[in-house]
Image (cartoon, rainbow, N blue to C red):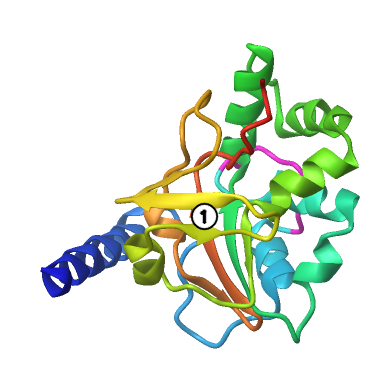
Amino acid sequence: MRSRLVTTLAAVVAAGALVALTAAPASASPRQNYGAPAGTIVDVAVAASGGGTPDSNPADYDILIQALTVTGLASTLADPTGRFTVFAPNDAAFLRLVTDLTGAAPASEAAALAAIVPLGVPAISSILLGHVVAGKALGPISVLLSRSITTANGSVIRPRLLTLRDENPRFADPRLVLSGLNIRASNGVIHTIDRVLLPASLGA
């Protein structure tokens, strides 16, 4: 039974990769990389985002990069001796977060970032660490087959098919973006998600 599930999940991931490679515009979103990793987690995210400055592409990681920089966590994920799995919210995920928290869609990525900053560095740091698994690089099949995954802030993610259930029942759970799975870096791997993983306390 388990082997059949592994085969099915592998087929889903492979189909997503095929769709991404054959149907998506070349610059639309970060995708699986099959060659040698091009630097650390931060290097890969910045390169995939054209430098990491907020723009009009909701599929990359500009807001995440800015948030990592503001909190000082960028230096941690840039550690070449580390080993990390990062569930990376794309810019669309942060736009959805601001909409959920404020009831109004931000006019731009820069506006979304400005709306997040008042949460404060400790809160933003905790949220970001809830997207990081330290000490291991989990492939997509390992993620999908896990009953639970504990992140660097102590939060628990519970994968169910392509959904990552977080600890906050108030907002929709993130889904894995098939075209953005298994983006390898020299110190780990990035799996793109379409919403931000949230602690139970946010929005209470």
Q: Quadrant of the C terminus?
A: top right
The part of the chain drawn in magenta is: 51-58
Asked whether, in this view, residue 6 is left or right of residue 102, the answer is left
Q: Position of residue 93 (x, y in %)?
A: 57, 38
The residue shown at (55%, 32%) is 168
Q: Position of residue 118 (x, y in %)?
A: 87, 28
176 or 152, which is in the foreground?
152
Q: Quadrant of the N terminus?
A: bottom left
Q: Is residue 189 above or below residue 46?
A: below
Q: Amino acid at mark 1?
A: Thr
Residue 167: name its quadrant: top right
Q: Is residue 28 visible?
A: no
Q: Is residue 160 above or below residue 79?
A: above
Q: Is residue 46 visible?
A: yes
Asked whether, in this view, residue 68 is left or right of residue 182, the answer is right
Residue 141: name its quadrant: bottom left
Magenta segment includes 168 = no
The residue shown at (70%, 77%) is 40
Residue 63: name its quadrant: top right
Q: Is residue 181 above or below residue 66?
A: below
Where does label 1 land, which residue? 192
The residue shown at (66%, 55%) is 154
Q: Secondary structure at mark 1?
A: strand
The residue shown at (85%, 68%) is 75
Q: Position of residue 60 (x, y in %)?
A: 60, 50
Q: Is residue 125 above or below residue 170?
A: below
